[in-house]
Image (spheres, grey):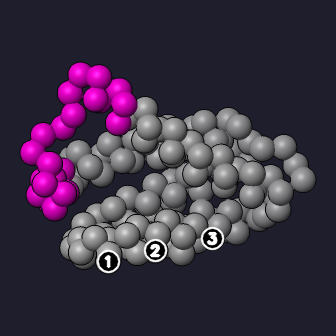
Amino acid sequence: MGPVNWLAVGIGTVLFFLVGAVWYGALFAVPWQREVGVGEAPRGSAVVRVMGLTLLCEFLVVSTLGHLLARTQPQPHVVMMMALGLALTVMAPAIGINYVHQRKSVGLFLIDAGHFVVGMAVVGAVFVLLG
């Protein structure tokens, strides 16, 4: 097992967070807010709580990928397969299961799952470039 690339974990986490900012801001703010019934963004201390927990959760996902990569030391194309594979076969289905039981729309699922897929593609690219 090689060492975890903590630089890639840190940069990947920040970029995953920024993908989310663009995804839920400029790209899908209106349809996402309509689907979840949120009228406006959090303010004050709620912003710190929401964004801090988001960043923490993204760090956990990215650091888990970092540990898997350190353990297996795969070729670059396999790094991308692992990153996208986690998004497509673990993260998206996990929210899909919840959304089916909560009777959420397919549109909301596509917005949220799309964020995971694009975010993890960026994270995978960071590990490839800094690998």
Measured in 3D between alpha carbons, the distance from the residue under mark 1 to the one under mark 3, in whole angstroms, is 27 Å
Near-viewer residue (89 or 46): 46
Which residue in the structure is indicated by mark 3? 81
Q: Report the mark closest to the observer, 2 or 3.
A: 2
Mark 1, mark 3: which one is toward the viewer? 1
Q: Which residue is mark 1?
A: 100
Percent coordinates x, y for residue 68 in the rendering = 74, 58
Residue at 32%, 77% in the rendered image: 100
Where is residue 109? Give x, y as percent. 30, 69
Residue at which label 2 appears: 93
In the figure, is residue 37 to the left or right of 122? left
Residue at 82% x, 62% y: name it: 72
Among the two numbered marks 1 and 3 on one chain, the one whose residue lies closer to the N terminus: 3
Residue 30 position, x and y percent, is 12, 53
82 up-or-down from 115: above or below: below
Q: Which residue is situated farthest in the right direction here? A: 1
Q: Read off the magenta span.
A: 29-50
Q: Of marks 2 and 3, which one's residue comes earlier in the chain?
A: 3
